[in-house]
Image (cartoon, grey):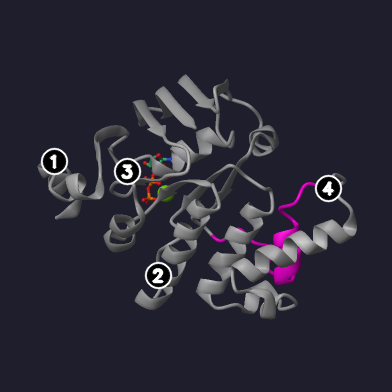
């Protein structure tokens, strides 16, 4: 579904990513882990056209999408959530999710139905008219996910969607991520907390200082000595 080929990115003298190659398989949950500053978010910024690629290629569904504009990448079927809060704080839950939807392609009624369907799926329907700034952290994360889903993506990039939550809330989000896979979606997620990553991932890539140092199943990554040395200890 997504192929990153020898992608590099520098910020001045800092090599944020160095010849990184990886593949995200269709209808699987693929994860990207690694220490702070490893280059994980930078890779998402390159995929989504938020930053320009210096070197290498990004191929999505057989098509070269390297350095397309963000809205073009979104139209191709890639959506994302952000590590930092990125919602409209003074709008309602409904309007934040609706903001993800492309305008003018569907009728007002279809738009409403589609947003409500997403809110049902995320168990947010009772909060539809609440203002987002007053929401607890779990619900705010779900609104971000809802807005990404509203673009009707084939691939969804989740940057630390699970993080800073209570264990029961984390389980809740894990279940939702797993059910996205059942809806034929492909997930590429960045994560810090090992338990949810190990639980949900089909395949894991490990980045450290801009380089891919390992990949494998959760079991393989758990037992990889190099990964332990840089990360899991
Ligand atoms: N727009 C930018 N301009 C300059 N430097 C940047 C920019 N974005 C990221 N960096 C630097 O590139 C490196 C990689 O950052 P990145 O945000 O990709 O790391 P990360 O793996 O997502 O880390 P974290 O786990 O803390 O979110 C860091 O040293 C960061 O300071
Ligand atoms: Mg990051």
The reply to whether discs 3 and 1 touch (Cβ–Cβ < 8 Å) is no
User: Reading the chain from its start, which is encountered first: label 2 or label 4?
Assistant: 4
- Stretch of the chain drawn in magenta: 85-103
Quarter the C terminus occupies: bottom left
Q: Secondary structure at mark 4?
A: loop
Q: Nearer the viewer, residue 219 or 80?
A: 219
Instruction: State the residue at coordinates (18%, 44%).
Output: 220
Among numbered discs 2 and 1, the one appearing first in the sequence? 2
User: Residue 226 got which mark?
Assistant: 1
Q: Is residue 14 visible?
A: no
**Residue denoted by label 3:** 203
Occupied quadrant, residue 30: top left
Q: Is residue 91 magenta?
A: yes
In the rendered view, would you say 81 is above or below 112? above
Residue marked by disc 4 = 103
- Label 3 crowd bin: few (<14), some (14–19), many (20+), radius 10 Å: many
């Amino acid at each position: 579904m997504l192929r990153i080929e020898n992608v590099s990115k520098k910020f001045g003298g800092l090599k944020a990513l160095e010849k990184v190659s990886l593949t995200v398989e269709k209808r699987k949950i693929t994860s990207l882990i690694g220490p702070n500053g490893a280059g994980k978010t930078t890779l998402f910024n390159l995929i989504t056209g938020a930053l320009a690629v210096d070197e290498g290629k990004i191929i999505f569904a057989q098509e070269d999408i390297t350095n397309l504009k963000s809205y073009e990448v979104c139209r191709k079927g890639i959506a994302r959530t952000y590590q930092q809060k990125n919602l409209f704080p003074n709008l309602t839950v409904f309007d934040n999710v609706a903001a993800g939807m492309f305008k003018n392609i569907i009728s007002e009624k279809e738009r409403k139905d589609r947003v409500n369907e997403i809110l049902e799926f995320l168990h947010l329907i009772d909060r539809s008219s609440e203002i987002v700034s007053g929401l607890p952290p779990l619900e705010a994360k779900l609104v971000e996910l809802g807005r990404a889903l509203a673009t009707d993506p084939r691939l969804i990039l989740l940057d630390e969607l699970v993080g800073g939550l209570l264990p029961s809330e984390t389980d809740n989000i894990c279940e939702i991520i797993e059910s996205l896979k059942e809806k034929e979606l492909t997930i590429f997620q960045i994560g810090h907390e090992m338990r949810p990553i190990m639980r949900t991932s089909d395949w894991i890539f490990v980045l450290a200082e801009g380089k891919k140092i390992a990949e494998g199943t959760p079991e393989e990554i758990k037992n990889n000595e190099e990964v332990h040395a840089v990360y899991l200890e």
